Amino acid sequence: RIVGFEVEPYSVQHSYMNQIDFDECTNHIAGDNQQCALNTCSAEEKVSLSSPPLLLDAKKTKPTEVIWTYDVIFEPSAIKWSTRWDTYLQSADDAQVHWFSILNSFMIVVFLSGLIAMIMIRTLRKDFQRYEQQDYLEEGQEETGWKLVHGDVFRPPPMAGWLSVFIGTGFQLTFSVIFLMIFAASASSVNWEHDPTSLLDITDTTDSVDVTFHYSARWTQSHLESRDHVEKAAPEHLEIRWFSIFNSIVTVLLLTGFLATILLRVLKNDFVRYAKSDEEETLESEDTGWKLVHGDVFRPPPMAGWLSVFIGTGFQLTFSVIFLMIFACFGFLSPANRGALMQAMLFLFVFMGMIGGYTSARLFRTFKGNRWKSNSMWTAMLFPGFTFSIFFVLNLFIWGQKSSGAVPFGTLVALLLMWTGISAPLVFLGSYFGFRKAPFEFPTRTNQIPRQVPEQPWFVNAYLNILVGGILPFGAVFVEVFYVLSSIWLHQFYYLFGFLFLVLVILLLTCAEITVVMCYFQLCCEDYNWWWRSFFTSGCCSLYLFVYSLYYASAKLQMARAVAFMMYCGYMLIVSSAFFLITGSFGFLACMIFIRQIYAAIKID
């Protein structure tokens, strides 16, 4: 059986056995009347790299004959019949995207199952405790829930025979498909014998043909605008990206529905239980739950100033990216101009400094901070200074290599002036208004003495939750990350900004949901230190982004010099840092809104 093939093209100057002109062999079979047979392509004379190539003389007036031949050589191979397609699948980029999509779905299903299992276990545990406490029910109070149907839950259904037939047939089909997949994956080639020294001789059926190559160019008027012309060169497998985004959207919607349904039921039980503070309750029910930390849940975190700086910068970046996507989707930015996106992002970030300063100052005042000028200075200088420092150091190395890609010194000065002359003043202006604004109000008062945090179970460990919380948001978008990296580092056009905007929405929704769930588990274990953890939980997906970028560099890029690798790592470090601030800030915002809502819904003595 044939398990693969390889094409080796050669340029060969063929000649006939009797050296006749090719015009005499037109419409004749090779070898007819001992003529028109090639002496350079036969069983005795094989084509090889040592064969003289065909040279075309442009000044020659007489037509030149181009003869097309091919040989088929069979060679033994160690490739199994069941894995014969792996070579071609691995050589195509679409195969990698296919694996990304499968891995994406697998990770989302695993973490969705884990989250739902944890919430369901907690819900069922409360149900078990409630049903065991029948002695505490008030007179005339009736039970509610799934326990009441214990006498009917196993009653045979109507048309039970048909149901058993369907279930049996379904199991029969399921096991048939499973064993079929097992046999297909483990099958190997059998009953195959072949002589590797045999050669298929096709010289008797070869006709010489006069091949003339030509082309024409015709210019026609088009209704497409200049910014839309790249869309005509869409990849053939554009459906893969639609399927990936549709998969992520459906998964996020299911995740939202499941979590909302289960969380609403759990929170409803919590509200009912906490509302009965004047009624008889067991000692165990009084000593557990997130209500007990109401006096500490809004306590300012350690290093609150740095947190406010990170949140403010994250909001500044978030609004910059949102407006950038809007402008790109409406066609204001042409993908043909590779520097347009970077320039637009730079200008948007500079003029969004007022939003960053306002958010940072108001949050800093909420944390009872009073040095708003210092807070404003760090908000204006931290991320831009970090980015400019890396960019300047990398540019020095490029200068040392005498590369034409180095940024001129005048451009660096212009960037520095934009930072210190426009962005920083806008940050200070936003901080001035933000600090004059009233701080965020919380529904509970903070106790004077901090409550001791009890020993935490293993599944709410801070480091574990942060690492787990970053996988799901990254898994929802990393198929599109592959295309973005390819467009940046493989010099390809990226023009599907509608896809990118949908992926951005999916990313932010996933960050919000995963952070809210992790925060709820943390509060249920009476750990009120949620400020920094909510920021790191959703921001941890930037760690996976940076790790994946290193894998992408090793698998797709060929960087012979150390400077090129340093440039790649430096630029991806900047991108990952911005990604960290954007996702962390949005997760923090969602968690803050969630906690304010649940504590405002209960009565605090």
Image (cartoon, helix red, strand yellow):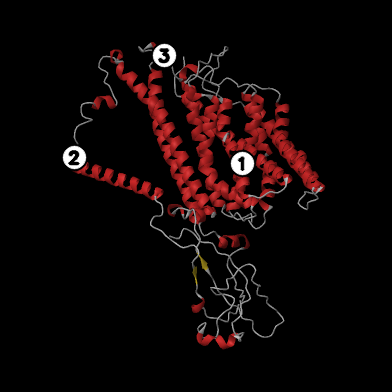
Residue 171 is situated, as x and y percent measured from the top left of the image, at: 28, 43
- Vertically, is 557 above or below 259? below
Which residue is nearer to you in this view: 58 or 148? Answer: 58
Question: Which comes sooner in the sequence, label 3 or label 2?
Answer: 2
Q: Residue at x 51, y 39 (%)?
A: 509
- Label 2, secondary structure: give it: helix
Q: Residue at x 62, y 45 (%)?
A: 554
- Residue type at tag 1: Phe
Q: CA distance from mark 2 to mark 1?
A: 58 Å
- Label 1, secondary structure: give it: helix
Question: Which comes sooner in the sequence, label 1 or label 3?
Answer: 3
Residue 436 seen: no
- Label 3, secondary structure: give it: helix
Residue 21 seen: yes
- Vertically, is 13 above or below 552? below
Residue 199 is situated, as x and y percent measured from the top left of the image, at: 50, 68
Residue that carries the numbered disc 2 in the rendered image: 160
Which residue is nearer to you in this view: 250 or 461? Answer: 461
Name the disc covering residue 286, or none: 3
Q: Residue at x 73, y 36 (%)?
A: 385
Q: Quadrant of residue 232?
A: bottom right
Residue that carries the numbered disc 1 in the rendered image: 319
Question: Which comes sooner in the sequence, label 2 or label 1?
Answer: 2
Q: Residue at x 34, y 18 (%)?
A: 129
Q: Quadrant of residue 430?
A: top right
Mark 2 crowdedness (10 Å alpha carbons): few <14, some 14-19, many ≥20 = few
Give the side of residue 4 with respect to residue 149, left or right.
right
Residue 193 is situated, as x and y percent measured from the top left of the image, at: 42, 60
